[in-house]
Amino acid sequence: MSFRLLRATVLLAGALLSSGIGSADEKAVMHCFFFTPIAEASEADWNAFYEATVELPSKIEGLDRVWAGKLRKRAAVSQQVKLGREYGACMELANEAALQTYAKHPAHDAWVKMYEKVRVPGTTTFDILGQ
C-alpha cells in the first residue's frame, strides 16, 4: 500500500473517530480492509456484496456505519505480490467489544459468504482506535 493512501485513510478514519463517537471511557474502532477483486465476479455478486454490507449495521449492535467501494487509487501490497488492492471497506464500531461481537455474529458469517464471491483470498486489514 502506498504511504500516501495509508496516511489519507488514517487521517480520514481519525477524523471520523474523533468526532465525538462513544463515551470518554470507550474508544470507537474503525475496522478497515482492502482487497483484490475476482475478475470473474458478476454484477449480481457485487450487488449482493454491497447490499449485505449496507445491511450489517441494522443486524449487529455496535456497528454504526459502513463504507465500501473501489479505492481512488490502487494500493500495492508489496513488491513480491503482484496483485494490488483495488476495493476496500471500513466499519465504524462503538468500541472494541463491538468489534468482537461483529467478528462472532451470525450476520458477519452470512456477509463473509457474499464477500468471498467478489474477492481474491487475502486482505490487508487494520483497526484504528479513537482518541
Image: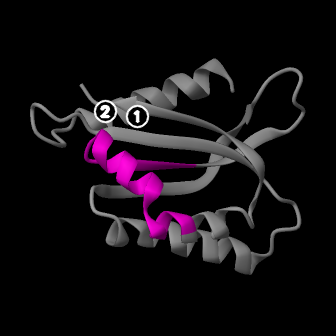
Residue 121 is situated, as x and y percent measured from the top left of the image, at 78, 50
Rate crowding at label 1 as few (under 14), some (14 to 19) or many (20 or more) other CA atoms within 10 Å. Answer: few
- Residue placed most toward the observer, 120 or 100: 100
Q: Residue at x 9, y 32 (%)?
A: 24
Q: Does dot 1 land on a helix, a strand or a loop?
A: helix
- In this orientation, which residue lies closer to the viewer: 72 or 41? 41
- Cβ–Cβ under 8 Å for marks 2 and 1: yes
Residue found at x 20% / y 38%: 19
Based on the displayed image, in which of its 4 quarters is residue 129 positioned? Answer: top left
Q: Quadrant of residue 60?
A: bottom left
Mark 2 residue element: helix
> Residue 25 versus residue 78: which sits nearer the camera?
25
Q: Which residue is mark 2?
A: 15
**Figure quadrant of the C terminus:** top left
- Amino acid at pointer 2: Ala
Tell me which amino acid carries mark 1.
Leu
Q: How is the image coloured?
A: one colour
Q: Which contiguous range is marked in magenta?
A: 89-109
**Residue pointed to by mark 1:** 12
Instruction: Identify whether 91 is placed above or below 52.
Output: above
Residue at figure coordinates x 80%, y 38% from the top left: 84
